[in-house]
Amino acid sequence: MAMITSVTMNFPHISTHNISSNPIFSPICTNNSCNYSSSSSVPISSNSIRLSSSIAYSEQVIVSHNVNLWTHLRKNHKIKVICARSEPLKVMISGAPASGKGTQCELIVQKFGLVHISTGDLLRAELSAGTDIGNKAKEYMNAGRLVPDEIVTAMVTTRLSKEDAKVKGWLLDGYPRTLAQAESLERLNIRPDIYIVLDVPDEILIDRCVGRRLDPLTGKIYHVTNFPPETEDIKARLITRPDDTEEKVKSRLQIYKQNSEAILPVYSDIMNKIDGNRGKDAVFAEIDSLLSRVQKEEQDARKSEESVISSTQADMISLRKDWRGIPTRLNNIPHSREIREYFYTDVLQATQRAVNDGKTRLKIEINIPELNPSMDVYRIGTLMELIRVLALSFADDGKRVKVCVQGSMGEGALAGMPLQLAGSRKILEYMDWGDYGALGNFVNIGSIGGKEVEKQDDLFILVAPQNAVGNCIIDDMRAMTDAAGNRPIILVNPKLKDLPASSGIMQTMGRDKRLEYAASFEICYQFRLLYYAGTQYPIMGALRMSYPYPYELYKRVDESPGKEKYISLATFAKRPSIDEMNDAFEGKSRNQEKKAEGFWGFLSGIL
């Protein structure tokens, strides 16, 4: 049995892979995901506890088992789940040297009261205080080397975790500077509400830099034409900074452009480019308008979300006594037919609700032990049963369903398909599809690709689409979604992590676009069990989401030998982070600050 390796941390004791935010890698909200792999050589302290999530995951929502109640809710409450965002405003601002970023940061802090965070200030503070991070950074600086991204990110995340930043919100000034830093923040689910870029023509930037003068006595910056000194005495002592020559400015601009272009795809959905070639008041007026609008949207979203959750929870409570809860003894395989049918029904009802609400790009992640993709192969019969239930149920509603399995990928020595799918199409063709001639009429078997889309098809179910080393299924999927238009496409247990070819070409060329496309599918059902890291026993708890209801976290409790139950710990409007689940298991409030000790404690959340 293949085990999932978890990230080791000194303080959290739960690790959930592919439960992040996102984002995503559509980084706007964490309701989407991007598969990253991470490894750590961080030493674990003697009192560390580690958990891993592998096989399955669940949120307990009673309403998913009552279609009549769902109809009533849709009619009377007009439920729409909104991705929740935290209360304080979170802002990132980027700009080339001399773009006026420092001035705008001052104005933003004055107006909105955000905590201003710049890596230069943080590094100087760490060095001055002689902290573990500061001493480690000093070693690199003394050796004439750049401070590694993980150390810089550790400083930033440590500062963001302080109470003032949580309460007041934060303004990240010129950070992240590189794609690696941006990806580190994404993995930690640290994401701004808005990403501001000050855009100034190169010739203006060069003039601003070359014309700058520094008063060594006061540290004040002047410009020979735009902001001349007040007196002749001040003018006489002004100096030109060594890095403000035209040659060095052009070099700095080139580096900035390369880094900013690499980062932009990460924040493209929340980026706002502002013309910085104006007076500071005109520039700030536009920034003020943007931030005020985001702040209002935050408040409206929270009110709407609170209303949605309260109304759905009231109806959930009314039916809780009639709901049997999460099945027990889930580590015992093969599962009984009762357990399998429970999950088939659970998945079906969530998917039907999403399709009825007009959703067209959907994703199901149902990783019960018999469908665990971390195993060597699928228990293919269970997967095919789930596909058959979905296809026949939509066919019963009069829809023509095409069930698609990817064919062989590559040519010659590279020909083949992912091992887990070998023979699955034949199994589908030979399965019992009932006595009413559904197969061939309302249900057809096909491959993944644009050419498979026909006019009579109403809905497509893709069986565990997955990339293979050196080959990418995403191009075929994109062609299919383009041809399908607004017809629903449902992915069942996809594995769309970007895998490199032997030459490394697949890993780099078009990677951002592939990840963005993979993240465009909205999760309508997820179920995952939570385990101690490196084990698949005992089960610690479960996390479940069934569209359109929130995530709910459960803890498994032994009642007596051979008997167990799942008790509800917390609900979440969006997929919870590792820290949020740890807090729930430990009984901590959601805004309680966690503390890690020492330099490695800071880095443990990153590596």
Image: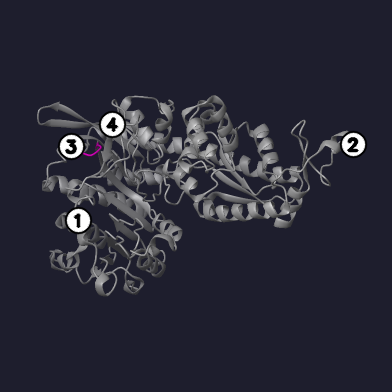
Q: Crowdedness of circle 4 by 10 Å Cα count: few (<14), some, many (20+)?
A: some
Q: Please report whichever mark, 1 or 2, sits nearer to the chain's N-terminal start.
A: 2
Circle 2: residue type: Glu
Picture quadrant of residue 509: bottom left
Distance from the alpha carbon under mark 4 to that under mark 2: 73 Å
Task: Tell me if 229 is positioned left or right of 51 in this view.
Answer: right
Disc 1 marks which residue?
383
Q: Please report whichever mark, 4 or 2, sits nearer to the chain's N-terminal start.
A: 2
Percent coordinates x, y for residue 175 in the rendering? 56, 43
Disc 2 marks which residue?
232
Q: Crowdedness of circle 2 by 10 Å Cα count: few (<14), some, many (20+)?
A: few
Which mark lies nearer to you, 1 or 2?
Answer: 2
Q: Residue at x 77, y 46 (%)?
A: 279
Disc 4 marks which residue?
568
Query: What range of the chain is rendered magenta?
Result: 532-536
- Which residue is nearer to you in this view: 226 or 367? 226
Q: Please report whichever mark, 1 or 4, sits nearer to the chain's N-terminal start.
A: 1
Disc 3 marks which residue?
537
Quadrant holding the C terminus:
top left
Q: Secondary structure at mark 4?
A: strand
Distance from the alpha carbon under mark 2 to that under mark 3: 78 Å
